[in-house]
Amino acid sequence: MRRTLLRARIDTITLKYNGDDESAEEREIARLEPAERQRRVARLRRELAAAERAREQARGAAISSASRNVTRLKDRLRRVSEKDNSVTAVLDYPRSGESRLMSHRQLNIPGDNEPFELPDEFLESALFKEEIQGETMLQILVTDKDRNSGFLKFLRDVLSAVFSSVVGDAIKGISEIFVSKAADNVGGRITKELKGDDKDSRVIGLARSRKIEIQVDADGGIDVRPGTGGTYVDGKLALPLLADRDFRIRRPGTDIAKGDQLGEIVLVLEAEAFG
């Protein structure tokens, strides 16, 4: 029996606000090309190593100055090397036996209301690649910087439950993207956390799209029914991202109310039959 594989990659994502009142430097960092980011990380690591040696050799009043320099370089290295936002795709009932699939990618998304374009290579911008039987419901969730560590911990817990093993910090090495197949015994918790019902939940930070229906056929055809949730033209699905809460932003005139459009994500969808 022929089956259908649905692939989605992020073409662009635009946010009016990314969870932080960024400086011009932080917005520039978010848009660094991968090669330039690597070079900057390497340079900062060298500078940090030299600063730490200087702190060890410092005496008297110079110790305080040397320590501040180390702290400053650590902060700059963190801002360049870490990915502070999270984009998650949730697929409801994509195929028999699977009530929900989650696919997650970490990114640095500028909050300057300008489209942030990802490379068109699938490995650089992939969001999910899943077998779909008939129809599924898709929703996109975006988290902010403050809540990212909580999100990663939650997803480690999910993987531990699904695979009956301790995942620990190993998740940080999974390229920035992974798919957790939600077993029935954790499906309820996933739903609860994604809705933010748990008082300790730190999963949802910024925005989400409305749920939209996607159908695929055995020949690899795609039928998207976005309704009021977006538009689908020439293989590209544009979804408005609606604010999860009120935001009071220091930049004048940019306060955003819950439910207002905070940005947009454009996905490239491709399907192919196999088997």
Image (tube, rainbow, N blue to C red):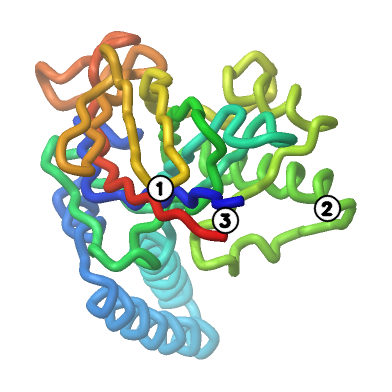
* Residue at the far front in the pictured view: 1
Q: Quadrant of residue 238?
A: top left
Q: Which residue is mark 1?
A: 219
Q: Position of residue 35 (x, y in %)?
A: 26, 79
Q: Is residue 143 left or right of residue 248?
A: right
Q: Residue at x 60, y 63 (%)?
A: 172
Looking at the image, is 196 positioned above or below residue 96? above
* Amino acid on which disc 3 is placed: Phe
Residue that mark 2 sits on: 163
Q: Earlier in the sequence, mark 3 or mark 2?
A: 2
Q: Would you place residue 145 above or below residue 230 in this image?
A: below
Tag of residue 178: 3
Q: In the displayed structure, would residue 63 be above or below residue 91?
A: below
User: Looking at the rendering, in which quadrant would you find the C terminus?
Assistant: bottom right
Q: State which tag comes first along the sequence, 1 or 2.
A: 2
Mark 3 or 1 closer to N-term?
Answer: 3
Query: What is the crowding at mark 2: few (fewer than 14 residues within 10 Å), some, or many (at least 20)?
Result: few
- Element type at mark 3: strand
Rounded to the nearest whole Å, what is the CA distance between mark 3 and mark 1?
27 Å
For mark 1, give the secondary structure.
loop
Q: Position of residue 67 (x, y in %)?
A: 46, 70
Where, by quadrant of the figure, is residue 248 drawn? top left
Q: How many angstroms separate mark 3 from mark 2 (CA)?
A: 14 Å
Which residue is at the front of the view, 121 or 272?
Answer: 272
Q: Residues within 10 Å of mark 1 (few under 14, many from 20)?
A: few
> Looking at the picture, how far across and down is residue 188, in whole percent?
75, 22
In front here: 2 or 173?
2
In front here: 178 or 253? 178
Q: CA gap, disc 1 to disc 2?
A: 33 Å
Q: Is residue 10 above or below residue 205?
A: below
